[in-house]
Image: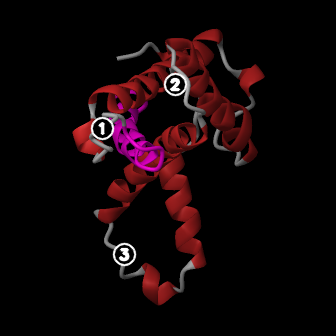
Amino acid sequence: MLPADAIPPIKEHPGEFMIRKAERLLPRSTRRKIPEQAKPVLSNALGLGYGTTFGALYAASRPETKRTVGEGALLGLATWMVGYLGWLPATKLMPPIWKHSPGQIATPLAEHALYGIGTVAGYRWLKEKGPRLNRADQSTKKCSRNRCPILTFVSSVFVTRAVIQ
């Protein structure tokens, strides 16, 4: 368990916030049909979707170059920045970053860096070692450009779940 000064001052779980906002857009009769047990599952799915989206964008946008640990850390930093400097304060789910303690900044920053490193490592592994999974051209033993983003998306689900959640 993390010490209190290492936990970000988030007011509400972002997934729960998004579900609450989405429910308000639905007609009352439809809202009543959503089982309460589904809400935590949907909330976690939104968090996974957030992390996997960054993994898929990374995989789809990278040129055919060697991926490095530093590049993974940058991916994690970018993911952190979009949330902690962008939409979380904008939605008032979290105070601006300058109101956080150093530990409240460092802990999630490190978690997101690990997420990025894990995502890039997963991408590299799939690209180099997973040709059968990717149904690659067997003559080159490399995954095709249009298949690796999909597999990176899937692999980053597991990385995101383990690191950020």
Task: Tell me where the magenta segment starts and ends, as one range.
Answer: 143-165
Please name the residue that numbered disc 1 is placed on: 139
- The part of the image, by quadrant, that contains residue 88 is top right
Specify few, some or many for label 3: CA neighbours under 10 Å numbering under 14, 14-19, or 20 or more: few
Labels 2 & 1 near each other (Cβ < 8 A): no
Query: Foreground mark, 2 or 3?
Result: 2
Mark 2: secondary structure = helix
- The part of the image, by quadrant, that contains residue 94 is top right
Q: Name the kind of residue labelled 2 in the image.
A: His
Name the residue: 49% across, 51% down: 15
Cα distance in 3D space between marks 2 and 1: 37 Å
Which label's residue is closer to the chain start, 1 or 3? Answer: 3
Where residue 67 appears, as percent x and y from the top left, is: 51, 21
Please name the residue that numbered disc 2 is placed on: 112
Q: Name the kind of residue labelled 1 in the image.
A: Ser
Which disc is residue 34 wearing?
A: 3
Q: Is residue 7 above or below residue 152?
A: above
Q: Name the kind of residue labelled 3 in the image.
A: Ile
Q: Is residue 27 above or below residue 135?
A: below
Specify few, some or many for label 2: CA neighbours under 10 Å numbering under 14, 14-19, or 20 or more: many
Where residue 6 appears, as percent x and y from the top left, is: 52, 15
Specify few, some or many for label 1: CA neighbours under 10 Å numbering under 14, 14-19, or 20 or more: few
Q: Is residue 81 above or below residue 37?
A: above
Mark 3: secondary structure = loop
